Image (cartoon, rainbow, N blue to C red):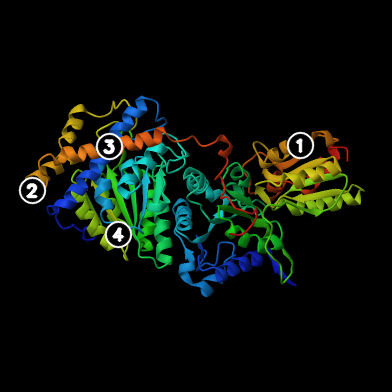
């Protein structure tokens, strides 16, 4: 079994411009979500709001290896994935505020961001439910002779679902181009991994389906990017690969969660591994981050988030007359075959 | 004109769809080498190959979800589930994904998938292979539910179902696979939006679908012998319901009995009854009657299974109870 577990080449220091790009992408997501907290308190965002603060390196790192034609399937903790994939901040924020200008017309909210333009297939809020979709998207690409990759994100909790195992088996059996990205933040909502899994080495589970699998430091964006690029190259035109991205969410599961199940010292320990300061330090040491450059990036991101919030605030509510639109596809002539 | 079975008509529809559109493929348990658990897809593997007639592991949620994903990715999958009872293992994918993705995405992602499965009792298969759960699926906005009750519908429903940009569930009644009938050579697609009057009558309307159509038609024969003229409406589409055809018949006959192989409580028959009461109350001469399956898990023993499921005599008795 161990021979199916490959080891990616070690991450080398990023070229300066690319390093700054990675930093900016992670900081955009961080700032976006920090402002979401304020908007939630201000009742402008409602429903369940799951933040990925601390986990930004996973989404940003994996997206670097994807092409425009590739597909992404994500979970309900997907703001970072949508933004890193290229959804505009305006579109995402308007969706969170329930406005018709949002990516899903305000029908989805925080848990259901969708974007056809970037082949972003949600925003799936049934744990494990997105994995079969990713298998099918990859099957469609394969049957149509398209050399695309489908990146499928899910958490450690999904590993306990039958759909995880069914999807691993199908993707491996049919040799489909799926990059499975398990963001292992150690907790399925409030249940620690070692309280719910008899085997906590998740890469080993994937490897048991003959899917090449390895674990990656999910707090190091360069390590994630290096592993994801290696895996994506192998997946493209090949079969599935699995990355266990070992990460941590600094905040509670959702805005409703009092976070009674985690030790404060554990959270603090992981905060010391925050991927953003970690990259800032690396870039500074390498001389890639000039004097005042970090502050400049912060100002630009603040302006982008301000603009997104202003856009969402100024957005419109979908007319109630449209409530039943898109239950089924709209056709110009009833009964006509498209 | 040729004589074919319901099974052969379904197979002709599958072969036709696979020939017409390269995006179409069939996927499910034992659809390929085995030839289909009810032999519907027998021979298709040889003509279309293992990519397009694709055997799957016993992973209902996995392969139904993969079908939904493939539909999102530009294919036109036909997914076969052995029986409606097994479809419960894929309920998450059907209800939480197929039915919701278009709405949840604000109209961006439609799911053009057809999911076929066997339903119904009558073959002594017991409580895990015989239930009529199609009524459950009719509760769900975002999916179309079809029940071909005739050779023509078995042949003609699949292609328009594949042309529908949204998910379609197609329920084949297991007791119908061996029935034979005439099929016109130029038999065309079926209008999926409409119910159809299978027999004209003036004293009572029997509203039914799927495997119960034959029971209702036989009951109409028996009633005719007594001088009672029964009209038989075959719903064909269980969701959306063609309420107009039902109401127009009831307005004309003034009495209605719903014949549904599902259980009575919380059923499709309840929905049909409610619509008749809502829209034709003042045209009724009697309360709406219902003939449904007894509220028991389906028993194996033949005499008990017959007792549990609607029979011709039950329909006749129900019609008499309305004073017809």
Image coordinates of residue B211 in percent, x first then y, are: 70, 53
Marks 3 and 1 on same chain: no
Residue A194 seen from this side: no
Check the residue under mark 1 and report the chain it is in. B
Residue A250 appears at what percent x and percent y?
Answer: 24, 33
Distance from disc 3 to disc 1, alpha carbons, whole Å, reads 58 Å
Q: Are marks 4 and 3 on the same chain?
A: yes
Mark 2 and mark 1 on one chain: no
Image quadrant assignment for residue A255: top left
| Quadrant housing the C terminus of chain B | top right
Chain containing the residue with disc 2: A
Provide the secondary structure element on which disc 2 rests. Answer: loop
SS class of the residue under badge 1?
Answer: helix
Q: CA distance from mark 4 to mark 1?
A: 59 Å
Query: What residue is shown at x 77% (from left), y 50% (from top)?
Result: B233
Cα separation, mark 3 vs mark 2, equals 28 Å
Marker disc for residue B279: 1
Q: Is residue A251 above or below residue B12?
A: above
Q: Which quadrant would residue B199 be assigned to in this image?
A: bottom right
Q: CA distance from mark 2 to mark 1?
A: 77 Å
Residue bearing mark 4: A210
Query: Which tag is nearer the camera, tag 4 or tag 1?
Result: 1
Left or right: residue B192 compared with residue B36:
right
Q: Residues within 10 Å of mark 2 (few under 14, many from 20)?
A: few
């Amino acid at each position: 079994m161990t021979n199916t577990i490959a080891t990616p080449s070690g991450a080398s220091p990023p070229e300066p411009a690319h390093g700054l790009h990675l930093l900016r992408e992670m900081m955009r997501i961080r700032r976006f979500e920090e402002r979401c907290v304020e908007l939630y308190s201000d009742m402008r965002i409602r429903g369940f709001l799951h933040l990925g603060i601390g986990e930004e390196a996973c989404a940003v790192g994996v997206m670097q290896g994807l092409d425009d034609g590739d597909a992404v399937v994500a979970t309900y903790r997907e703001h970072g994935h949508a933004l890193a994939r290229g959804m505009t901040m305006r579109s995402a924020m308007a969706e969170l505020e329930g406005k018709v200008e949002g990516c899903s017309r305000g029908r989805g909210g925080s848990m259901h961001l969708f974007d056809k333009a970037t082949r972003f297939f949600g925003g799936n809020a049934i744990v494990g439910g997105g994995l079969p979709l990713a298998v099918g998207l990859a099957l469609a690409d394969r049957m149509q002779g398209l050399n695309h990759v489908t990146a499928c994100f899910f958490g450690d909790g999904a590993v306990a679902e039958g759909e995880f195992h069914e999807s691993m088996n199908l993707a491996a059996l049919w040799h489909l181009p799926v990059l499975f990205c398990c963001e292992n933040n150690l907790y399925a909502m409030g249940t620690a991994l070692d309280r719910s899994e008899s085997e906590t080495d998740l890469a080993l589970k994937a490897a048991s389906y003959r899917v090449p699998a390895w674990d990656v430091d999910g707090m190091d964006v360069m390590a994630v990017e290096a592993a994801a690029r290696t895996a994506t190259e192998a997946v493209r035109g090949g079969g599935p690969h699995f990355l266990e991205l070992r990460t941590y969410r600094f905040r509670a599961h959702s805005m409703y969660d009092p976070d009674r199940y985690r030790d404060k010292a554990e959270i603090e320990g992981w905060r010391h591994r925050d991927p953003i300061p970690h990259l800032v330090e690396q870039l500074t040491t390498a001389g890639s981050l000039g004097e005042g450059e970090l502050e400049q990036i912060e100002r630009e991101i603040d302006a982008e988030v301000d603009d997104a919030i202003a856009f969402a605030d100024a957005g419109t509510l979908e007319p109630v007359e449209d409530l039943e639109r898109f239950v089924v596809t709209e056709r110009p002539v009833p009964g006509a075959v498209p | 004109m040729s004589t074919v079975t319901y099974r052969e008509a379904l197979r002709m529809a599958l072969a036709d769809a696979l020939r017409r559109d390269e995006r179409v493929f069939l996927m499910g348990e034992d659809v390929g080498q085995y030839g289909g658990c009810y032999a519907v897809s027998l021979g298709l593997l040889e003509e279309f190959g293992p990519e397009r007639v694709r055997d799957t592991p016993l992973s209902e949620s996995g392969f139904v979800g993969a079908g939904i994903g493939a539909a999102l990715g530009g294919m036109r999958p036909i997914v076969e589930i052995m029986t409606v009872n097994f479809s419960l293992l894929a309920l998450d994918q059907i209800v939480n994904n197929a039915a919701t993705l278009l709405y949840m995405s604000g109209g961006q992602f439609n799911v053009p998938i057809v999911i076929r499965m066997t339903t119904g009792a009558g073959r002594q298969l017991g409580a895990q292979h015989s239930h009529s759960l199609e009524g459950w699926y009719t509760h769900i906005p975002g999916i179309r539910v079809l029940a071909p009750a005739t050779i023509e519908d078995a042949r003609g429903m699949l292609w328009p179902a594949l042309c529908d940009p949204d998910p379609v569930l197609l329920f084949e009644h297991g007791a119908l696979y061996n029935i034979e009938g005439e099929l016109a050579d130029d038999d065309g697609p079926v209008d999926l939006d409409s119910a159809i009057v299978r027999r004209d009558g003036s004293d009572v309307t029997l509203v039914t679908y799927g495997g119960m159509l034959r029971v209702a038609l036989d009951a109409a024969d028996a009633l005719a012998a007594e001088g009672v003229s029964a009209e038989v409406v075959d719903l064909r589409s269980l969701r959306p319901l063609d309420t107009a055809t039902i109401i127009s018949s009831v307005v004309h006959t003034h009495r209605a009995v719903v014949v549904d192989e599902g259980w009575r409580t919380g059923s499709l028959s309840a929905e049909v009854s409610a619509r008749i009461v809502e829209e034709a109350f003042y045209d009724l001469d009697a309360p709406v009657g219902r003939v449904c399956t007894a509220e028991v898990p389906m028993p194996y023993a033949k005499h008990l299974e017959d007792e549990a499921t609607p029979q011709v005599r039950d329909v006749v008795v129900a019609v008499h109870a309305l004073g017809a």
